[in-house]
Image (tube, rainbow, N blue to C red):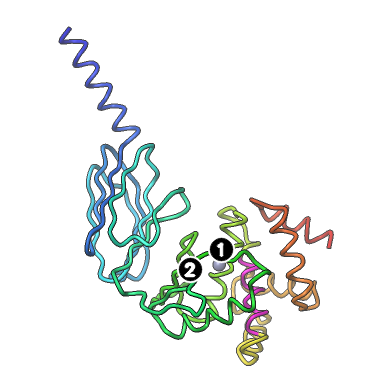
């Protein structure tokens, strides 16, 4: 009888190790992971300049002042107790985002964007006016200005940016990358986000637009931000009506797309 009991306990421990239960808490600047087994994590906060990653066993603690991002592998069973989460990780590709209270104190005119910078929240009105009805508009967007070398989107609702130009690009990733999913090695989402950024710059910041065209043409950027964008842009004669109608067709027909499908659809244009 005793023997069976110990085998049972052993099996339970084994199951918990390989199919762990994870408990994630966050409270005034401290994020804690409690786990019955192993977990992988990616972490970023205002205390560091790039993502750190690693493997943890049973417990791990992270600190932040203003904001933090945590991606941890999904457990079958996960419990969250988070005070300052503006977003909870629900899928493997998304992440928790924690922002300290009152840090995002600026709200856009239509209240869908909040930011830690007034000039970014103000830009949101023009973004609204320009893109509404053309791409998928998120119900809310948290725009965090950070002094980082590269801007990025934590899908679905958070973007980290270091300029207005990047804000437009990352905003478009809600449609191209999240609403229509892409693969890790695909470039089509970058091409479309960058093209839409060009269209917006052309309308509102003509000087910036001209210098972007120049940089893209002289090979300043990697191809998916430079020459491939110019090829796509020129194929549609740089006309926004044609570009948005191609994108609309993608939005209506694709849920997940790779470069092969993208280029075959582009070829039939
Ligand atoms: Zn991008």
**Residue lying furthest bottom in this view?**
207
Q: Position of residue 146 (x, y in %)?
A: 39, 76
Residue at the spot 19% in from the left edge and 16% down from the top edge: 6
Report whether 160 appears left or right of 68. right
- Badge 1 or badge 2: first in the primary sequence: 2
Q: In front here: 179 or 128?
A: 128
Q: Position of residue 125 (x, y in %)?
A: 55, 81
Residue 20 vs 180, above or below: the answer is above
**Range of magenta residues:** 190-201
Residue at the spot 75% in from the left edge and 58% down from the top edge: 263
Residue at the spot 69% in from the left edge and 58% down from the top edge: 251
Q: Position of residue 5 (x, y in %)?
A: 19, 14
Residue 262 vs 101, above or below: the answer is above
Q: Is mark 2 within 8 Å of ligand 1?
A: no
Tag 2 residue: 141
Q: Are marks 1 and 2 in contact (CB under 8 Å)?
A: yes
**Quadrant, the N terminus:** top left
Disc tally is 2
Residue at the spot 33% in from the left edge and 63% down from the top edge: 98
Tag 1 residue: 174
Magenta-colored stretch includes residue 193: yes
**Quadrant, the C terminus:** bottom right
């Amino acid at each position: 009888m005793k023997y069976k009991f110990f085998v049972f306990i052993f099996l339970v421990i084994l199951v918990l190790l390989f199919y762990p239960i994870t408990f994630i808490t966050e409270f005034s600047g401290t994020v804690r992971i409690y786990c019955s087994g192993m977990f992988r994590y990616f972490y970023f906060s205002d205390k560091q300049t790039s993502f750190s990653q690693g493997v943890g066993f049973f417990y791990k603690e992270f600190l932040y002042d203003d904001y933090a991002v945590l991606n941890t592998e999904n457990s079958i069973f996960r419990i969250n107790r988070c005070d300052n989460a503006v977003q909870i990780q629900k899928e493997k590709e998304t992440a928790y985002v924690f922002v300290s209270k009152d840090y995002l104190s600026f709200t856009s005119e239509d209240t869908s964007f909040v930011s830690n910078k007034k000039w970014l929240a103000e830009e949101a009105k023009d973004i609204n006016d320009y893109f509404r009805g053309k791409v998928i508009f998120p119900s809310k967007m948290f725009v965090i200005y950070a002094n980082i070398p590269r801007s990025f989107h934590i899908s679905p609702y958070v973007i980290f940016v270091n300029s207005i130009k990047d804000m437009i690009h990352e905003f478009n990733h809600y449609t191209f990358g999240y609403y229509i999913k892409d693969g890790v090695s695909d470039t089509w989402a970058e091409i479309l986000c960058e093209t839409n950024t060009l269209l917006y710059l052309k309308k509102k910041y003509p000087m910036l637009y001209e210098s972007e065209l120049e940089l893209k043409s002289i090979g300043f950027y990697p191809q998916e931000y430079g020459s491939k964008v110019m090829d796509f842009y020129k194929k549609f004669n740089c006309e926004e009506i044609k570009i948005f109608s191609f994108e609309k067709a993608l939005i209506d027909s694709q849920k997940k797309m790779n470069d092969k499908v993208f280029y075959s659809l582009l070829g039939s244009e």
